[in-house]
Amino acid sequence: MSNNQQTADRRVLQLLSQTFRDEKAASTEIINLSAIMHLPKGTEHFMADIHGEYEAFIHILKNASGRIRRKAEEALQGELGDDEMRELCTLIYYPQEKLKLIADEADEAFYRTMLTRLVRVLRTVTSKYTRSRVRKALPRAYAYIIEELLHEHTSEGSRAVYYDAIIDAVISTGQAEDCIVAIAEVIQALSVDRLHILGDIYDRGPGAHIIMDKLLTMTNWDIQWGNHDALWMGAAAGNDCCIADVLRMSLRFGNMATLEDGYGISLLPLATFAMETYGDDPCLCFEPQTGRSGIALDEKTFRLMARMHKAITVIELKLQAAILARHPEWRMDDRLVLPRIDYGRGVYVVDGVDYEMRDTHLPTIDPADPNRLTPEEEELVQKLHHSFRISEKLQRHISAIFSHGCMYKITNGNLLFHASIPLNDDGTLKEVLVGDRRYSGRELMHEVGMMMRSAFNHDVPREQRAYARDFFWFLWSGPDSPLFDKSRMTTFERYFLSDKEMTHEEKGAYFRLRNQAEVCDRILDAFGVKGEKRHIINGHVPVRATRGESPVRADGRLMIIDGGFSRAYHHTTGIAGYTLVFHSRGFDLVQHEPFGTAREAVEQGTDIASSIQIVEHTKHRLLVRDTDKGRALQGQIDELRQLLAAYRSGEMHK
C-alpha cells in the first residue's frame, strides 16, 4: 500500500473515530449495519410521463400501484370479502375524506375494527424496515401509541389485555379518527421505499403544479428530466422561445390552470393582444383540443383561447428564427419557416414545390422581413418574460427538479432516462455538440445536465449562461437532442399545411434500434451498468397497447413505461399508463385503466383498475445486501472493522 493510500485511510479512521469513539460504539454500529443488510430490499416505484394528471398520480401514489391492497390481503389472510377490503383500502388511501363521509355511521365498534385492521396492515408493511426507520416515519403525536400497537399482539394473553386497553383509550379520548389518519398515512409512506419519475411532469393535464407540491412533501424521490420538463425549465430560466412554447402547449389543450392558478402567470396581455390582432379571425386551425384533454370550456373562452393560441404560435415561429440565427451550429435551418411562405400566392414553398396553406391570415408578418417581431409583439414578449421570471412558485418547483434530478440515473442494475441515447445508424454511440465540444453516451448526458444547470448559476460567465438558456430550446426540438431525437419538430406544418406527409417527424436511430438486445447491451456497457439482470427503463413514447405493442422488449433488457398517463393519449394507447414496481421478489409491470376522480374513489370505493404483468421474479428474495445501498453499507462496515482493529491494536487511541 502506498504512503498516500495509508494517509487517506488514516484520515478516514480519524473521521470515523469522532462519531464512534470507542470499541463498543464501533461494534454496535457494525451489528446494526449487518442486520440491515439482511432485511428485504425496499420497494422502488417507477412512473413516467405524468403530464399534469395530478389526481391519477396522487391516487397511484396512495395505493402504491396496488401494493397496498396486496399487503392488506397478505395481512388479513382472506378474512374480508371484496366489499370490506375495498372499504379498508379506501380508508387507507383517503382517510380524512372517508371518515368525513361516514361520520354519522361510525361508532365505537367501527373504530375498534378499523384500528385493529390498520395495525395489522402496518405490521406487514413495516416488516422490511428496522424499528428505527419505522419510528422516524411515525407522526410525533401518535408515535408511542402506534409503536406499542405494532409490537403487541392480541393473541398473547395478558399482552392482549394491554393491546385492548390502548385501543379503548384511543377511542374513549376521542382520538380514534386522528389515529386512523396517522396509521393510514404511515402505511402509504412506507409501502414504497423510493419513487423514480422518468420525466415529463409538465404539459397537457391541468395539475403539474399540484404534482410538484405533492413531491415537495416527500423525501425519497428522484426525476430524470423529460423534454416537457426541460421546456418549463427553459421558460423559468428566461428563454423566450421556451416561454412561447409553454404557452402554445397549454393553449393547445385548453389548459390554463397550471399557468394561472399554479404559477400566477398573467395571460391578460396575451388575451388583449390576441383579440386586438385576431378578433375577426375564427382561428379554426388553432382550436383547443379539449376533446382529448377532457377540459370543458364555454364557447366564448374556447374562441378566445383559439386566438391566443394562434397569436403565440406566430410569435414562437419568429422567436425560433432568432435563436437559430444565434446558433447555426445546430443545423436546423429547415425550421426557418416564415421566409418560405409566398405571401402573394398564399402557399408554402419547399425545394420548388408548393404546399397549400390552411390559414393565410397573418397580419403581424411583414413579407419583406417575416421573422421580425412587431413592436406590439415585442412588448408582449417582455411582459410574458417578466411573469415567468418573477413567479416564485415556478422558480421553487424548478429548483426542486434540479435538486432531485439529472438526465439519467443508475440504480440497482437499472439505467433510467426519459427518452433517448443518441445513436448512429449502426447502433454505435452518436457524438452530439454541446457548447464547443462533442460528447456521446454517458459523457453526453452528464454534459447536457451540467449545461442545463449553468443557466441558473450566477457564478457562470454571462455568455455561457446565455448559451445555456438557448440550449433548453435545442433540447426541446433539436434533432440530436437526447430528449427529442427526431429529424425535426413540425410545429408550423401541423398548424398551417394541408399535406399530412409534411408533418412527419422521423425518429432517431435509438428508437429504431432499441428493441435489439445487443444495442441495449452496448448502451448499458457504455454507462457501466453491472449485473446479470440489468435493464434500461424509459418513458417518452407511449406504448400502444391496443395495437399489441409490448412495454418489455429486447429480450427483457428494455422496459418502456409510458402507457399514456395523460388523457390526451388515452384514445391512442387504449390504457391510462404503466407503472413499474421493483420489490424484493422482482419486477411487476402494472397496466392501469383510466382513473375517474378522487371524489368517486372516496364515495364509491373505486380504485384504478390495474392488471399486473410479472416481468421478472427471482427464486430468492432480494435483500438490502444485493442492492447499491447494500454495497455502500458493506463499505461502511469494512471501514468500521478497520477502526475496531485500530482501537484494539492501540493504533487509534480512545
Image (spheres, grey):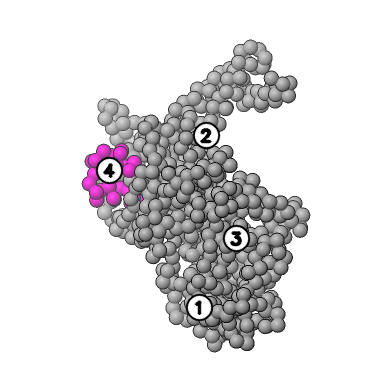
Quadrant (top left/top right/bottom left/bottom right) for the C terminus: top right
Q: Quadrant of the N terminus?
A: top right
Q: Nearer the viewer, residue 33 or 490?
A: 490
**Which residue, given by chain and number where applicable, does mark 2 sit on?**
629
Instruction: Identify residue type, mark 3.
Output: Pro
Q: Secondary structure at mark 4?
A: helix
**Amino acid type, mark 1:** Ser
Residue at mark 4: 113
* Disc on the earlier residue, 3 or 4: 4
Alpha-carbon distance for marks 2 and 4? 38 Å
Is disc 4 surrounded by few (<14), some (14 to 19) or many (20+) residues within 10 Å?
Answer: few
Q: Quadrant of residue 292?
A: bottom left
Q: Which residue in the protein does label 3 denote?
A: 479
Task: Work out whether 290 lies above or below 543.
Answer: below
Q: Nearer the viewer, residue 245 or 104?
A: 245
Q: Which residue is mark 1?
A: 498
Q: Residues within 10 Å of mark 2 (few under 14, many from 20)?
A: some
Q: Position of residue 454 (x, y in %)?
A: 69, 53
Among the two numbered marks 1 and 2 on one chain, the one whose residue lies closer to the N terminus: 1
* Mark 2 or 3: the one toward you: 3
Image height of 124 relative to 242, above or below? above
Q: Residue at the spot x=63%, y=87% of the render? A: 344
Q: Locate residue 149, reporting x and y percent.
A: 36, 35
Q: Nearer the viewer, mark 4 or mark 1?
A: 1
Q: Spatial distance from mark 2 to mark 3, Cα to Cα?
A: 37 Å
The amino acid marked with disc number 2 is Lys
Check disc 3 and report its element: helix, strand or loop. Answer: loop
Label 3: how many residues lie within 10 Å, few (<14), some (14-19) or many (20+)? many
Highlighted range, magenta: 70-94
